[in-house]
Amino acid sequence: MKLKDKVNLGPAGLVLFLSCWANSGASFAAEPLFVQRVESATPSREAIGKAEEQVREHKDVKFREKMAVPPFHKRMEPPLKEGETYCQGCHRPQPHSKKLRTRSFLNMHSRYIACETCHFRPEDVRLEYRWFDYAARQPAAADGGRFRTGRNLDNSVLIDGKFKIAPFHRGEPAFALPGTAFAERVGREWQEGDLAVRARLKARLHAPLSKEGPACAKCHTEDSPLLDLAALGADSRQAAAIRRHVIPQFFGRYQSDDDRLKIIDILR
Ligand code: HEC
Ligand code: HEC
Ligand code: HEC
């Protein structure tokens, strides 16, 4: 419902409007793009079946206290742990464990790059990447001082986990935040639901997400990189140092060497 439709409503219409608002809170246009995509997701049977297996194996130990439904008056308060993304309510702080080669780099990146920057990359829209202050729960101005790469003394800047590079859509944050109505509703469903409910919920939540993030070279490249480092505040020296960093460059080669190895294995 558009705002102007609201203006000429009589009392009955107003009640109708308000109840629509309450019922459709999550699909309301002002919701972040990720939330809209979750709300409209229709996962396949296969995806739900797979999710059921995962949820059955998923240990709720991982599922931390923070996701518990907060008392009503606390609804909009910041999450208990500063700098945490919505995803970290269910995933461990170091969520990457499967791939030995990349996991420590990805876990380190998660301190200054939001999960959604790498995992929420819908193909049909253009996202921009900006700093977001998870403690203040608002966008933060560009600031090259937050980058450690390309300085005279590398790594002399401590990572302040509350600032992360996060996706924006039409100037608005494209991701969910802990403590919002959406997060509460999901948390409640997840805690109270049986296996079928949780499986469906897992499938819907992850339908708009990519299982894998972008390759290292998507960001560490000169050739149309994912992030506009200048818009994030990096000067040209910093941007060049990040884009040409030798470690991710090496990773690109290393991976293809590995592919060759596998072919040799097959031929053996
Ligand atoms: C309600 C809990 C919950 C939330 C919130 C959640 N996840 Fe998950 N996620 C799971 C479960 C359960 C799995 C299955 C694997 C496991 O047990 O860890 C999973 C698996 C994944 C996987 C592996 C691929 C797949 O789909 O199985 C990725 C990647 C992932 N999540 C990313 C995210 C990101 C990014 C967010 C935030 C936008 C997020 N998750 C939010 C519960 C959650
Ligand atoms: C810099 C990009 C990047 C960021 C940031 C990132 N991921 Fe990932 N993620 C990846 C890639 C790439 C993979 C595929 C596995 C690999 O290459 O190691 C992956 C895989 C995963 C998996 C599958 C399990 C595993 O061990 O690989 C989960 C779950 C996951 N990510 C969750 C998250 C969550 C939660 C966050 C935020 C706290 C996050 N990711 C932040 C790039 C990223
Ligand atoms: C979404 C974009 C993105 C992806 C994908 C990405 N990086 Fe980075 N990476 C960055 C940014 C931005 C920095 C600069 C951080 C800073 O200077 O504080 C960086 C810095 C680094 C650094 C140096 C600083 C540090 O934190 O030690 C290394 C090494 C690195 N990345 C390796 C990798 C590897 C390996 C991969 C793939 C597994 C990868 N990156 C994937 C964006 C990315």
Image (cartoon, rainbow, N blue to C red):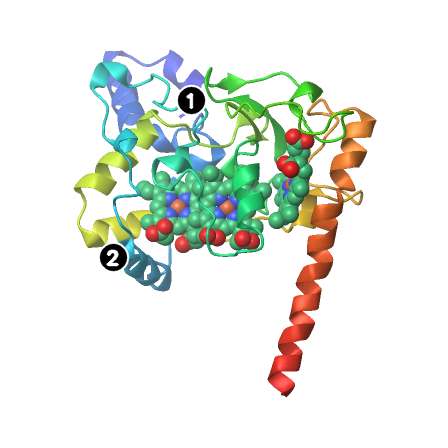
**Which residue occupies 47% across, 22% down?**
134
Q: In this orientation, does residue 209 appear?
A: no
- Relative height, residue 263 to residue 189 (above, below): below
- Residue 197 percent across, percent down from the top left: 22, 49
The residue nearer to you, when weighing 103 against 141, is 103
- Residue 127 percent across, percent down from the top left: 61, 35
Residue neighbourhood size for the residue with mark 2, other residues' Cα within 10 Å, grouped as few (<14), some (14–19), many (≥20): few
The residue nearer to you, when weighing 201 against 3, is 201
Indicate which quadrant contains ligand 3: top right
Circle 1 is placed at which residue position? 82
Cα distance, mark 2 to mark 1? 30 Å
Image quarter of the N terminus: top left
Name the element at disc 1: loop
The residue nearer to you, when weighing 69 against 125, is 69
**Which residue occupies 61% across, 83% down?**
266
**Which residue occupies 58% across, 17% down?**
140
Count of numbered tags: 2
Q: Is residue 150 left or right of residue 173?
A: right
The residue nearer to you, when weighing 128 against 179, is 179
| Quadrant position of residue 51 | bottom left
Circle 2 is placed at which residue position? 56
| Quadrant position of residue 113 | top right
- Residue 215 percent across, percent down from the top left: 64, 51
Image quarter of the C terminus: bottom right
Q: Is residue 19 left or right of residue 144?
A: left
| Label whose residue precedes the other's in the sequence (2 or 1) | 2
- Relative height, residue 215 to residue 83 (above, below): below
Residue neighbourhood size for the residue with mark 1, other residues' Cα within 10 Å, grouped as few (<14), some (14–19), many (≥20): some
Whether pointer 2 and pointer 1 mark residues with C-beta atoms closer than 8 Å, the reply is no
Farthest-out residue, bottom = 268
The kind of residue tagged 2 is: Arg
**Which residue occupies 80% across, 42% down?**
222
